[in-house]
Amino acid sequence: MRISSRTKSMAFFITLGVFLVALTMVLNVSWIVINWRRVVPLVFGIIFFGLIIGGLSVNTVFLVREIRRNEQQDSFLNAVTHELKTPIASIRMYLETLESRQLDEPQRREFYRIMLEDTDRLLGTVEQVLKAGEARQRSKRKNWQELDFSELVKSALELTRLRHHLTPENLRFGVTPPEGLLVHGSPEELRTVVFNLFDNAVKYSGENREIVVDVRTPDMDTVLLSVHDLGIGIPRSELKRIFNRFYRATNPLAGQVKGTGLGLFIVRSIARRHGGNVYAESEGEGRGSTFTVRLPRIYRV
């Protein structure tokens, strides 16, 4: 298996950092042994070497983080390039076929259907990238209003069934959502949150598509949306990192799923901008996962 140049660089700098820290500790101990009777040089020596060790440790940590961030950005660029190139090549192929051959009406309609699906895939990728940029920059509460969160989730669930050709058994409510759960926010952004969670559950469920959605109120001031699937699951060590920008899970099965690594980052950014948050739960690989969004509720007496 090939080792990338960036991985080699990371290993080199980690080794160098460890060596320098070890060398500094040896010098520090030697200084203490030589000057143990001299109080002032001893104190200054300990402080000085402590600062060196701390500086080297911090430098190594930040260096490794930067290398990992660059690797994630490279993975993101590769994923986006693939997500853009594949549907474009597909659309071009079908257009060339339509231009060069005489096809009957059913074949033409099938080609049109496939090209429309490829166009939707292109638009979805572009929208994810644009929304990720907005999620980092947007701070104003533009076009916010009171809305019924239960109705928003219901309509998103029905549309997701149509988009992915799912049955009510594949995607359903665990319990019928209560009516009149009001939240204050952007309808467009909150729909993005719900659709991203639904699409994520569908993509990572594989063939075992049994997704259960719940909307509930644990108290008067909170609304929770939970999306539970029986898919590939998430290693516990990655439950927090999956919300980072560009991050893709290390599960081999997750690597087979197409995506940009931006969906959950967008969900978290929007939830936090609305005064809430999102978190994930999973018992491990192959044991499904549950994503829960918490939003502040507007309570009317």
Image (spheres, rainbow, N blue to C red):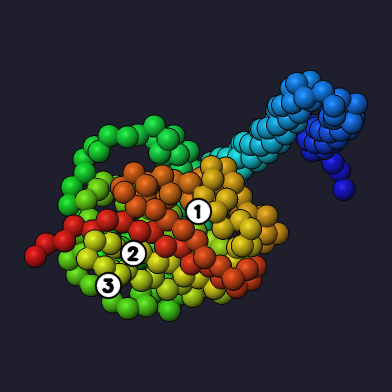
Q: Which residue is mark 2?
A: 224
Query: Quadrant where the C terminus lies?
Result: bottom left
- The quadrant in which residue 249 appears is bottom right
Q: Position of residue 282 (x, y in %)?
A: 56, 67
Cα separation, mark 2 vs mark 1, equals 37 Å
Disc 1 crowd rating (10 Å Cα; few below 14, some 14-19, many 20+) is some
Q: Are marks 3 and 2 in contact (CB under 8 Å)?
A: no
Which mark is in front, 3 or 2? Answer: 2
Q: Residue at x 48, y 51 (%)?
A: 264
Q: Residue at x 57, y 42 (%)?
A: 246
Eyeballing the image, is 293 above or below 167?
A: above
Amino acid marked by disc 3: Pro
Amino acid marked by disc 2: Leu
Q: Are marks 3 and 1 in contact (CB under 8 Å)?
A: no
Q: Residue at x 32, y 78 (%)?
A: 175
Q: Which residue is mark 3?
A: 177
Query: Which structural element holds mark 3?
Result: loop
Q: Which residue is mark 1?
A: 114
* 247 sits left or right of 117 in the view: right
Q: Compare residues 123 and 132 and report the one nearer the observer.
A: 132
Cα separation, mark 3 vs mark 1, equals 35 Å
Amino acid marked by disc 1: Ile
Q: Position of residue 265 (x, y in %)?
A: 48, 46
